[in-house]
Image (tube, helix red, strand yellow):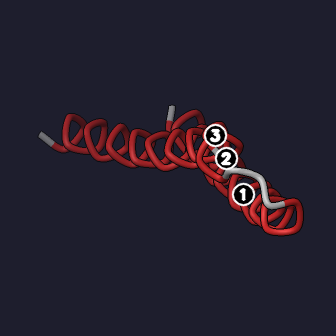
Amino acid sequence: MYNYVWLSAGMGVLSLILAIFFLVKDLSYCEQTKRKKLTYLLANWGMFLLAIVWIGLGISLYVIIQNQLTA
């Protein structure tokens, strides 16, 4: 059962790394082409926040399961 929790948290970390990579890449693209950052980077910020929430949910799920098993 813990394997699924850690697999989910690992996928969250992987998506966080990819979100940071694409965010930095697109930020430099916006600087070069003078595009509006707010509208162009909205999807990247959404992916970043989703990855943070995903990791947080994985950790909280692990803690909740651990508390139920020890109680």
Check disc 1 and give the amino acid type: Leu
Q: Is 30 situated left or right of 9 in this image?
A: right
Q: Residue beneath label 2, please?
A: 41
The label number, if any, that marks residue 39 in the structure image: 3
Q: Are marks 3 and 2 in contact (CB under 8 Å)?
A: yes
**Local secondary structure at mark 2:** loop
Whether residue 33 is situated above or below residue 60 in the rendered picture: below
Where residue 15 appears, x then y in whole percent? 69, 47
Closer to us: 27 or 50 = 27
Check disc 2 and give the amino acid type: Leu
Q: Are marks 1 and 2 in contact (CB under 8 Å)?
A: yes
Closer to us: 21 or 6 = 21
Q: Is 53 situated left or right of 50 in this image?
A: left
The image quadrant that residue 71 belongs to is top left
Where residue 56 appears, x then y in whole percent? 40, 47
Q: Are marks 3 and 1 in contact (CB under 8 Å)?
A: no
The label number, if any, that marks residue 23 in the structure image: 1
